[in-house]
Image: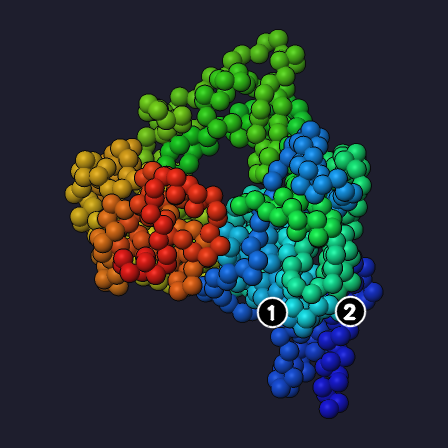
Amino acid sequence: MEIKQQITALRTQLREHNHNYYVLDNATISDYDFDMKLKELQDLEAKYPEFHDPTSPTLRVGGMVTKNFETVVHGQRMYSLDNSYSKEDLEDWEKRIQKGLGDIEVEFTCELKYDGASISLTYEEGKLIKAVTRGDGFQGDNVTTNIKTIKSVPLQLKGDYPPKFDIRGEIVLPFEGFAKMNAERLANGEDPYMNPRNTASGSLKLQDSAAVAKRPLDCLLYGIVGQKTGITSQWQMLDKARDWGFKVPAVARLCKTTDEVMAFIEYWDVHRHDLPYETDGVVIKVSSLQQQDELGHTSKSPRWAMAYKFKAEQVSTVLNEISYQVGRTGAITPVANLEAVLLAGTTVKRASLHNADQIAKFDIREGDTVFVEKGGEIIPKIIGVDFSKRPQNSEPTRYIDHCPECHTELVRTEGDAKHYCANYYGCPVQITGRIQHYISRKAMDIEGMGSETISLLFQEGLITNYADLYTLTKEQVMPLERMAEKSAENLVNGVAASVNIPFERVMFALGIRFVGETVAKKLAKAYKNIDALMIATEEELTAVDEIGERIAQSVVEFFENETNQETIARLKSYGVQFELSAEKLQNQTEKLKGQTFVVSGVFEKVSRDELKKLIEDNGGKVGSSVSAKTTYLVAGAKMGPSKRTKAETLGVQIISEDDFLGLV
Ligand code: AMP
Ligand code: ZN
């Protein structure tokens, strides 16, 4: 009995400290003391497993690994928001609302639009039961084990919470934590992450929750859905959520007029850069829930809410130099090296220039003062030149005509905006780029090896193509810089394990120009093994669904090349998969050949993804929107009404889940 009390007391204290620190930003205990208490609790829990509690603060450190995230249907759909960009847009919206509601008083709750990954949390009896990503709005992925590691997500609520409800919010990665993560990556020789938003949403799908626990993610909440919550307005909702222990930013404001709304927007357009996390606008919501109910939804978004998007920020700075990068396919990308300038809260030194045409279009020259804009990505773009500041002796940019890495003359094929270094087998950056692509996560997913290692192995003359990876020995690898025995072993084992990667991924890993993940799958499915594919002609290839001339030509060229043929023969001899697995072959038919399906709504027996897979495995095609080419619309529950109308107008047959399963 005494032990149980001790455990409960520790849990309560640690919860309170977590809340103070992560939600209220107001710590009342030193990190050291916190860690000591946590350790004490961990020890007790280990010793007395009978007192296990899934909401214990000790579970925050993660450790559970999720291989496949289960698909979960949202109790209530997660909608998108309509966007507006001006005061006029907002006034129009307000007029529509007033018209919809009759001339009664309307109050608006203004909140910031947090830029991260949407999440829906389910609580029962005050305990976090489930966390699901937005997915397509109807159903998402169950990422509960990962979400539990985010310290500002309460595992156990306090106060007068309702017995069961969902709460929606955004998982964000604050700038400071993001910068720290990138500094660490760079120090480890890894590529930095692009931006906080993508990194936040990528984090949710990491398999190892301990890795998620290490990321300084935050969860900001904005909406409760559920029956009998006793809540009558959006404004009250925010307050209640705070009371129960959720992190709800305090900047929200209740406004009575469009002028007040505009004042809120103008203020935050400037001051958002002082916030610790990224925001891309303001969300304005009709506050009364009853009025929200009356206004309802369109097929895509609530009529009672509107996002106001901030304009991308712009600055001008001097372009010091244009440099050129060579990619793994030999494509040349020009890069603008800028005089460092502060833009949207970060220091910008480089901007991408895309290609020669873009430089010519804006007549961008070294020494120019250029306008730089930042959209969603970390790499900003140049949107123009300040010609008034052009130096007198300025000369037009002469695009390079030789590869900066291997000095081979560049080529440009018609219809392609990029220049290429055609020295496919000799250009060092292309060689290492291809091997780096081969080992990457979506390709052969070889663990224990990074881009840096590949460069080192190449410099040491140990590898010149990806087949060489398979003959590397521990003894060869160990002398490399920063390589310990254990990591050398991991590397060799990682390579050996890659022989189990299925054929379609091997197809992608080969790095054939224009053959991305989807095309690789298509080719693998159509030809079933590499021998058949290697002798396919351009004509045969273009007959395959979605394979165009450009791809066909590139595939034929790749396999005609003797070096490639040799490499493939070698990979084969090492056991790399060059045919579809028996299991995949077995489940494939041509039953739906020539038919195009559009899938909409929620299904009972199979998930949407499974349904799509069934269509493809049986030779059918999955379309994204209903058109005259659609053969069937497979309708699930809660299908969007616009799809139905469109199908009916075009005479497209609408079938149920059972009808479909009957077909296959
Ligand atoms: P969009 O994806 O542009 O249609 O915008 C909708 C998304 O904005 C939702 O899925 C939310 O995750 C996100 N969002 C961020 N902040 C808020 C907020 N304060 N209120 C509602 N949605 C928000
Ligand atoms: Zn080159």
Residue at 23% across, 37% down: 542
Q: Nearer the viewer, residue 284 or 445?
A: 284
Q: How many marks?
A: 2
Q: Nearer the viewer, residue 369 or 541?
A: 541
The alpha-carbon separation of the residues under discs 1 and 2 comes to 18 Å
Q: Nearer the viewer, residue 400 or 301?
A: 301
Residue 203 figure quarter: bottom right
Horizontal and vertical percent position of residue 463: 34, 48
Horizontal and vertical percent position of residue 67: 45, 65
Q: Quadrant of the C terminus?
A: bottom left
Residue 317 figure quarter: top right
Say which amino acid is labelled 1.
Ile
The residue that mark 2 highlights is 159
Residue at 26% across, 54% down: 618
Residue 515 vertical placement versus 358 (above, below): below
SS class, disc 2? loop
Q: Does the residue labelled 2 lie within 8 Å of ligand 1?
A: no
In screen coordinates, is 632 left or right of 17?
Answer: left
The residue that mark 1 highlights is 129
